[in-house]
């Protein structure tokens, strides 16, 4: 079930809000838990079996860590192994088998391991396994061991706003809110606002940019001019940002409607002046997760310089691999890691001395080239597309103007403006009654326009569901 669907907006959400606010305080977490399971089961019952098994076993691992005096580390290792094994089995096992078969074919061995093997990827498994590992690490590292309750554990893992596509919520950030929180009218109101903004970003901007990208990429790469190639990847950059940040906005807004404060996941990443800054602004919950649970345990930057670079490469290799089981994603991760290392070698000091426009242009080009490997998973096709991006002498290709119309131009301009803090700064200014009236009117119009787009449009994908 998508947040940007009529079923969710007009049936599921009103039902859970009514049930939640009419129920006694002692029932509220159970109401959220029940509806969260319904929300997840909507995507497939077979997914739900895996999800429930994962919750139950992680609950026992958490209890083992909390209650054991001498074997808590063994319980932790067992829990981490289980979660990694679960994620590997569903997301990476087919990738491993395919590469073994490819190696065998390359050396002309008459050997095929599990020919045409297909395993369905459970919704949100990359997100909820990371949350579960965060929980186990936090419980292990806590000096004061609190009682582990199944209902609290299940709600932390399965709370529907962030269940299938994040943000990756930390146990220490949410457990006290699960146990004790206060719903207020102002928090609910801000949640509704945030949900509408996220819905608009997803349905109006991301979907329109996605249609433009798909149209451009349906053409033969060799027929594109450099302007069309750049238009395609810029549109994709806007699509993936507004798709994922829009979903995060909706998740944060939904959390507020039930009294939860979920941390921010994006902070205008496309205004970054370096790749290091980009990763402080992009998918914050994932980058900080890898920092805290991989980079720092490996030694971070406290070891030798060479080990620091090794740690960075490991982190970004895993970051790419987390997104998908293809070599294109792996390369995308290493690609970003390489630029992080280049900046740490001293290039960051050069960037700091350059005018904003030049340093921004550098980071933008690096990011956009990287998105090519993210969007085009075939490595050879991705390289061909990048070649056309920089083939400035080509004069007979299909130009960007061939793919543009007035609606696309407006959407791209709106995307460019909303990718900066400009509008956020304007709306944070001292409010007057007239300003509040205009703001609320705009939100109502955004909601109506988004619902109309959902009702009359058939194109409504969500990129991060496959991760």
Image (cartoon, rainbow, N blue to C red):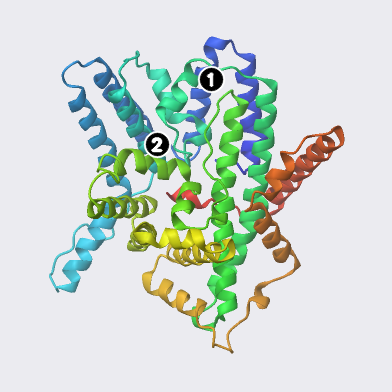
Instruction: Please report the residue visible at 59 percent of the width from the left and 46 percent of the height from the top.
Output: 246
Q: Is residue 443 above or below residue 343?
A: above
Which image quarter: residue 157? Answer: top left
Q: Secondary structure at mark 2?
A: helix
Which image quarter: residue 287? Answer: top left
**13 left or right of 134 in image:** right
Q: Are marks 1 and 2 in contact (CB under 8 Å)?
A: no
Viewer-closest of 342 and 129: 342
**142 left or right of 40 in image:** left
- On the rendered image, what quadrant is the N terminus found in? top right
Viewer-closest of 193 and 124: 193
Which image quarter: residue 289? Answer: top left
Residue for badge 1: 31
Is residue 117 among what the camera can see?
Answer: no
Separation of marks 1 and 2 at Cα, in angstroms? 20 Å
Q: Earlier in the sequence, mark 1 or mark 2?
A: 1
- Residue 129's x, y, as percent? 35, 37
């Amino acid at each position: 079930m998508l947040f940007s669907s009529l079923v969710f907006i007009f049936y599921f959400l009103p039902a859970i809000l009514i049930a939640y606010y009419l129920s006694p305080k002692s029932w509220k977490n159970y109401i959220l838990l029940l509806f969260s399971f319904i929300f997840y089961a909507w995507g497939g019952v077979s997914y739900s079996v895996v999800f429930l098994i994962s919750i139950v076993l992680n609950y026992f691992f958490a209890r083992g860590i909390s209650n054991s005096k001498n074997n808590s580390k063994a319980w932790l290792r067992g829990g981490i192994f289980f979660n990694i094994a679960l994620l590997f089995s569903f997301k990476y096992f087919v990738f491993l088998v395919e590469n073994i078969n490819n190696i065998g074919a390359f050396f002309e061995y008459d050997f095929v391991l599990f020919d045409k093997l297909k395993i369905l990827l459970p919704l949100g498994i990359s997100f909820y396994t990371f949350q579960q590992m965060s929980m186990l690490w936090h419980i292990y590292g806590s000096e004061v061991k609190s009682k582990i309750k199944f209902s609290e554990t299940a709600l932390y893992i399965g709370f529907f706003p962030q269940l299938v596509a994040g943000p990756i919520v930390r146990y220490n950030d949410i457990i006290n809110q699960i146990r004790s929180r206060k719903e207020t009218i102002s928090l609910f109101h801000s949640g509704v606002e945030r949900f509408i903004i996220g819905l608009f970003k997803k349905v109006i901007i991301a979907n329109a940019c996605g249609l433009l990208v798909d149209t451009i990429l349906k053409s033969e790469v060799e027929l594109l001019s450099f302007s069309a190639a750049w238009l395609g990847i810029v549109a994709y950059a806007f699509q993936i940002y507004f798709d994922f940040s829009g979903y995060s906005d909706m998740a944060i807004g939904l959390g507020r409607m039930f009294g939860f404060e979920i941390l921010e996941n994006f902070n205008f990443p496309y205004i970054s002046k370096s790749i290091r800054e980009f990763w402080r602004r992009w998918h914050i919950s994932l980058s900080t997760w890898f920092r805290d649970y991989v980079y720092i345990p490996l030694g971070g930057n406290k070891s030798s310089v060479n080990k620091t670079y090794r740690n960075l490469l490991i982190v970004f290799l895993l970051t790419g691999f987390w997104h998908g089981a293809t070599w294109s994603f792996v390369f995308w991760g290493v690609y970003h890691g390489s630029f992080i290392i280049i900046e740490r070698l001293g290039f960051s000091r050069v960037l700091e001395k350059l005018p904003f426009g030049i340093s921004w242009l550098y980071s933008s080009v690096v990011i956009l080239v990287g998105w090519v490997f993210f969007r085009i998973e075939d490595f050879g096709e991705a390289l061909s597309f990048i070649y056309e991006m920089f083939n400035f002498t080509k004069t007979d290709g299909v130009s960007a103007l061939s793919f543009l119309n007035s609606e696309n131009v407006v959407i791209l301009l709106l995307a460019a403006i909303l990718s900066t803090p400009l509008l956020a700064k304007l709306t944070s200014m001292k409010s007057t009654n007239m300003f509040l009236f205009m703001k609320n009117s705009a939100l109502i119009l955004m909601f109506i326009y988004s619902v109309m787009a959902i009702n009359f449009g058939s194109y409504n994908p969500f990129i991060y569901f496959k991760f």
